Image (cartoon, rainbow, N blue to C red):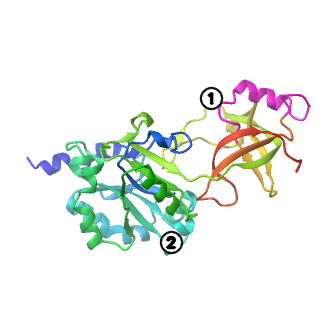
Amino acid sequence: MDNDKVIAPHSRAQDLKPLLAPSEIVGIDIDVSTLHFPIYASIKFNGIRGLLMNGSFISRSGLPLNIHNTILYELQPLVNFCADNKLVLDGEFHAYSDNTTGGMLSMLAGNKKLPYDFKYKVFGIYTYRQWNGADTIFMKDMQESPYWEILSNTPPISQLELVIQELIENASELDDLVFKVQQNSLIEGVMLASPSLLMGHGRQPVRAGKFLKMKFYSDPIDGQIQNIYARQEHLPETETEYDINDRARRSRRQEDMYVTNIGGCLEVKLEGGLIVNIPFPKGTSLQMRTLYLKNFRKGGSFDLYGKWLQFRKLNAGEKDKPNSVKCVEFRDSKGNIL
C-alpha cells in the first residue's frame, strides 16, 4: 500500500483546527513572572490566518478563503511546491501598510489593490504525517525542519515571508525584545511558544503556559460617560453562522433583534473630543447593568452620567476608533468635558 496516500491531507485533515493561543494576554491577564524559559518569540500579525493544504488556502475553521483568481495565480507556485513535497503550511496574510483584518479581507477578495508589502507569512511547516498526527512534533522539532532553509534559499513566490522565531533565554531578554519591537507602532505584539509545545490542533489552555500571546497596549486612557446604549439580543429563532476566523456571527438586522432593559455599552467622550463606545468593566453583572440603564441621568448612586472611566487599547491596527479595548475601570472624577 502507498503510505503517502494513507497519510495525505484529505477531508479529515481540513477538520483539524490549527494551533490557537489562549485569549488571555501576557502582561494583562497573565503574570510575566509565571513564564518558563527558554521560550520562542515571534512577531504577532494582525492579518488573516490561512492554512495551505489540499491545494488551497483555508481559514482556521476549515472554510475556503475568498481569494481572487489573480492572487491565486500568483500564489500557485507555492501551492505546487507544497503538493510536490507533501507539506501543510500555517501562516497569515498580512500587510503593515493596511494593518487591519477587514482591509486584508478586501485585498484577498480583489476589492482592494494589493500593497507593496503584501505577504503570506509562514510560521508553521508540517509534513502530511505531522499534520494528521501520525508523527509527533514539538515546537523545537519544527524549527529544525529543513524546509525553512529550502524555502528561504529558493522561495517559490516573492510574497512568501518566513517568520523568524527568536529563542529567548530569560525575562531580561524578553524585556529587551519587547522594548525593541514596541518602537514600531505597526507591530501589535509577540507570540510566545515553549520548545516543548506539542504542535497539535485547537486552542491551547492558558494553564499549560506553552503557547501565549503578548499584545502591546496603551497606557490608561480617560473618558467621561455621556450615554448608555441598551443591550440588544437575537430572537431565539435566529441561526448562528461562523465567519472565516471561526467567530460566531448572526444577523444584525433589526427584525432579528430585540432591545432589552440591560445596559449594553457606554458612550464615552475622550479628553481630545473623540466619542467612542466602551464595554462595561469586566465583571459588571447584568443586574448592575440594568440598574445603571434604569437610573441614567436620574441622579443618585446608580447614575453613571458624567462619571469617568479609564481603559487601555491595542496600539496597532487602529483606524479612527480604539481597537481591542481592555482593562475598563471606573475611576475618580475629573473636570467636566461634556
- Report if residue 118 lies within the magenta region: no
Image spot of residue 65 (x, y percent) = 44, 56
What amino acid type should be assigned to the residue bearing mark 1?
A: Pro
Say left or right for 249 vs 196. right
Tag 2 secondary structure? loop
Magenta segment main secondary structure: loop
Look at the picture and state if 68 lies above or below 334: below
The answer, for residue 44, to whether it is visible in the render is: no
Dot 1 crowding, Cα within 10 Å, few <14, some 14–19, many 20+ = few
Instruction: Give the quarter of the image for residue 51.
Output: bottom left
Q: Determine if the magenta segment contains residue 294.
A: yes
Name the residue at the right extreme.
Answer: 299
Mark 2 lies on residue:
114
Q: Residue at x 86, y 41 (%)?
A: 306
Q: Position of 83 compared to 278: left or right? A: left
The x, y position of residue 255, in whole percent, is 71, 39
Please identify the residue farthest to the left as the structure is shown.
1
Q: Amino acid at mark 2?
A: Leu
Above or below, 7 against 207 in this view is below
Residue ID for mark 1: 236
Q: Is residue 184 above or below residue 13?
A: below
Q: CA distance from mark 1 to mark 2?
A: 41 Å
Instruction: Name, please, the residue furthest toward the front.
Output: 172
The image shows residue 122 at horizontal and vertical percentages of 37, 60
Look at 75% across and 38% down and name the residue there.
330
Q: Is residue 45 above or below residue 159?
A: above
Q: Which residues are magenta?
A: 279-303
The answer to which quarter of the image holds residue 184 is bottom right
Circle 1 SS class = loop
- Which mark is on residue 286? none
